[in-house]
Image (cartoon, grey):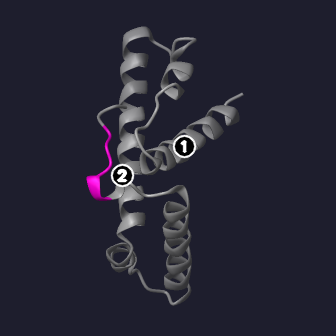
Amino acid sequence: MNTVRTLPEFAHLSDLEIQAAINAYDAAADNTQESAGDESGDILEENPIAGEFLRLVNAYTERMDELIRTEKDKRGELSENFLADLLAYEPENNMERAAFDFVTGIFLDLDDGED
């Protein structure tokens, strides 16, 4: 996980600033869908904080997928402590924490659905 890092210009942001940017992105995306356009690139250009959040979400998703595949290739299944070890990772700043928590929440929801 430690290969995923936010860009320096976003490392100082507060949780409130990040959440406000994500909410603004969601609202703009909803408005774009209602007008039947696909202007998500424009929305991200206007909202670089949300763009960085989405970049990190993609990076964490790819990294977790890679770690899971490696573990399964090595052992045939996920070890008992794999998920706990994965979730023990501590992001270095609020932006990384928001993206990491978002991705781990999805992975945990998927894991709950397999029972």
* Quadrant assignment, res 68: top left
Say what secondary structure mark 1 lies in. Answer: helix
Q: Which x, y percent locates residue 89?
A: 46, 28
Q: Residue at x 55, y 23 (%)?
A: 83
Based on the picture, tell me whether residue 89 belongs to the magenta stretch.
Answer: no
Q: Is residue 115 above or below residue 94?
A: above
Q: Which residue is mark 2?
A: 11
Residue extending farthest bottom: 35
Disc ID at residue 114: none
Query: Could you tell me the amino acid type at mark 1?
Result: Asp
The rendered magenta stretch, by its main secondary structure, is classed as: loop
Q: Which residue is mark 1?
A: 101
For label 2, the SS is loop
Instruction: Name which residue lies at 49% across and 57% down.
Output: 14
Q: Which residues are magenta?
A: 4-9
Residue 54 % position (x, y): 41, 57
Which callout, 1 or 2, points at the residue further toward the start of the chain?
Answer: 2
Task: Judge whether 4 appears above or below 54 on screen.
Answer: above
Where in the figure is residue 115, as x and y percent of width and height? 72, 27
Disc 1 to disc 2, C-alpha distance: 16 Å
